[in-house]
Image (cartoon, rainbow, N blue to C red):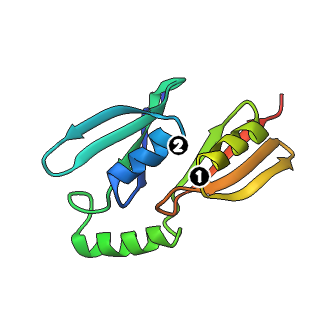
Amino acid sequence: MISSLGTTQIYVLDQDKALDFYVGKLGMEVREDVDLGFMRWLVVSLPSDPSRGILLEVPGPPAMAEETATHVRELLSKGATGGHLFFRCDDAHKTYAQLKEAGVELTEEPVDQPYGIDFGLRDPFGNHIRIAQMKG
């Protein structure tokens, strides 16, 4: 049966801008950056968990027709494509302060939740991100 999750995917409008955000601001690393000819396969991962990656994919062929990709890009820029990432951290308040200082668009301050403390942000393309300090 299935033993692990290796790569998941979100849409971005510009892969170089995505690298600036995910690597430059969130501290991830490039795991794979391959020109396949028909697309750029760009995967980032956390240094602490290189086995799990996020494919930063530009909407378009070969995955979808250009007409569909146009609609997906419009929805993405409105934050309506359903792209969500959930990260964990050891100290939500400290991580929030570090990201604020780095110029990240934070959409919600740290909030106490039944499961821990979490806060929200968006990447430059409209994808929603939550970062949580879990209890226990």
Other residues around mark 2 within 10 Å, as few (<14) / some (14–19) / many (≥20): some
Q: Which label's residue is closer to the chain start, 2 or 1? A: 2
User: Residue at 76% across / 33% down in the picture?
Assistant: 91
Q: For the image shown, how many numbered marks are present on the structure?
A: 2
| Element at label 1 | loop
Residue 115 screen position, x and y as percent? 82, 41
Task: Give the Cα separation between the discs numbered 2 and 1.
Answer: 8 Å
User: Disc number at residue 103?
Assistant: 1
Residue 41 screen position, x and y as percent? 27, 43
Horizontal relation, residue 106 to residue 33: left or right? right
Amino acid type of the residue that numbered disc 2 sits on in the rendered structure:
Lys
User: Residue at 53% across / 62% down in the picture?
Assistant: 82
Horizontal relation, residue 52 to residue 136: left or right? left
Q: Nearer the viewer, mark 2 or mark 1?
A: 1
User: Disc number at residue 25?
Assistant: 2
Residue 5 seen anywhere in this rendered image of the structure: no
Horizontal relation, residue 74 to residue 46: left or right? left
Q: Quadrant of the N terminus?
A: top left
Is label 2 in contact with label 1 (beta carbons under 8 Å)? Answer: yes
User: Residue at 75% across / 46% down in the picture?
Assistant: 118
Other residues around mark 1 within 10 Å, as few (<14) / some (14–19) / many (≥20): few
Residue 54 screen position, x and y as percent? 43, 41
Amino acid type of the residue that numbered disc 1 sits on in the rendered structure:
Gly
Horizontal relation, residue 48 to residue 112: left or right? left
Viewer-nearest residue: 126 or 134: 126
Where is residue 31, by image quadrant? top left
Residue 88 screen position, x and y as percent? 67, 36
Residue with the most extreme left position: 37
User: Residue at 49% across / 59% down in the picture?
Assistant: 124
